[in-house]
Image (spheres, rainbow, N blue to C red):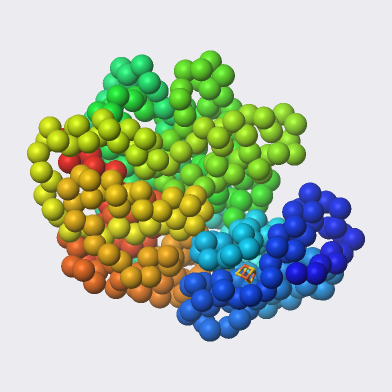
Amino acid sequence: MQTNLADFIKDTPQGIEAERILRACVHCGFCTATCPTYQLLGDELDGPRGRIYLIKQVLEGREPSESTRMHLDRCLTCRSCESTCPSGVQYGRLVDIGRHVVEARVPRSGAERLTRWVLREFVPRAGLFGLSMKAGRMVRPLLPGALKSKVPNVRPTGQWPAPKRARKWIALAGCAQPSMAPSVNPSAARVLDALGISLQEMPGAGCCGAVRYHLNDQEGGLDDARRNIDAWWPAIAAGEVEGILMTASGCGVQVREYGHMLAGDEAYAEKARRVSEMTQDVSQLVLREAKVLRALLEQRGPGSGERIAFHAPCTLQHGQKIRGVVEGLLAAAGYEVLPVADAHLCCGSAGTYSLLQPELSLQLRDNKLAALGAGGPSRIASANVGCMTHLESGAQVPVVHWIELLDERLA
Ligand code: SF4
Ligand code: SF4
């Protein structure tokens, strides 16, 4: 696509990156058919090609309007369009740049600014968020339906194994997961312990930065990244750990971008690159240890054949391009993994999207639950805390992290 970026952005790092991405787009529109918001709304401007065009216009100097911002707000940043695009257009990076420019030029109402401020300041603080979840659970029966669905039930965490293995990995606790799905990391720690690896969470690490970054507080998101790097670096520099493990694919996609996001920060660029390189989703690590896993599963005899529907989060399948790995591991563990129609589509959770765009989010959730439920699963599994709690709010069967299923099988 021909571009002629305006002076305000043309020679900046963002402008150079945006121009490269825009030029890769040949405007073919293949991406449109796989965009969840285009499927719901049927408007070209609510699909990737239309949004790319809107961003191009803004970066070329056209004044954005409230309508421009609305079409960008409606995007889930699910990156399904990236998976479809034959030209490798990095839409996710482009939309971050476009949103940043539009946000600065089209002021939001006081109420919208307040909502976004509360989300930016509240969700990433694990302690505060955890306290509110505790309080929410105490008064759960009294809460209105919409709020009740944001306070999920939690499962017992069980024991975290002592760090006795010579091989060690760092685990990110994150901000929402410890209070919304506290059983996930202990399950991962037990599975990895069985595979000969000790998992440990580092004090001082917290939110991966995705919440702030995608609410257009990009500096705040980078500060979260720097804080995590500081918390992990002593163990990395001392060669004490093999890698950094993500049990929430939404955090994984963000941490794997630290190297890119902090490339211009002299003090952190090299550390961030190394951290991103060392970061893996838990499914990748378990797959690497498949030989040991197979032996353990054989010792435990045949699996239950329980029918499971797996929802692959967008941050796993589109963001990190990890496809089919979890399904293969669950099948190897003796679960019956059911086929799911339109598995590429977002469930509507998308970070804070379910709070900011509730109508679209609920439609996507209900469509996803219908697809997941079609084969009659006894449980739904996923790989990201946001998707899990969002799906659970409307599901007829329990929703778990897939590593909890593997933990059960190895117990
Ligand atoms: S983003 Fe890719 S698929 Fe979509 S219009 Fe551009 S080139 Fe075509
Ligand atoms: S990121 Fe998702 S919602 Fe946004 S344009 Fe791409 S496919 Fe559509």
Identity of the residue drawn at 47% across and 18% down: 240
Compared with 94, 200 (above or below) is above
Give the quarter of the figure containing the C terminus. top left
Give the quarter of the figure containing the N terminus. bottom right
Compared with 167, 385 (above or below) is below
Locate residue 333: give its quadrant. Answer: top left
Please state the horizontal and vertical placement of residue 346, each as a whole percent of the image: 44, 65
Please state the horizontal and vertical placement of residue 404, each as a whole percent of the image: 25, 44
Which residue is at the front of the view, 202 or 30? 30
Locate residue 163: give its quadrant. Answer: top left
Identity of the residue drawn at 45% across and 75% down: 359
Which residue is at the front of the view, 162 or 383? 383
Identity of the residue drawn at 81% across and 73% down: 63
Asked if residue 368 shows in the view, the reply is yes
Identity of the residue drawn at 64% across and 75% down: 28
Asked if residue 176 shows in the view, the reply is no
Please state the horizontal and vertical placement of residue 326, each as a whole percent of the image: 33, 49
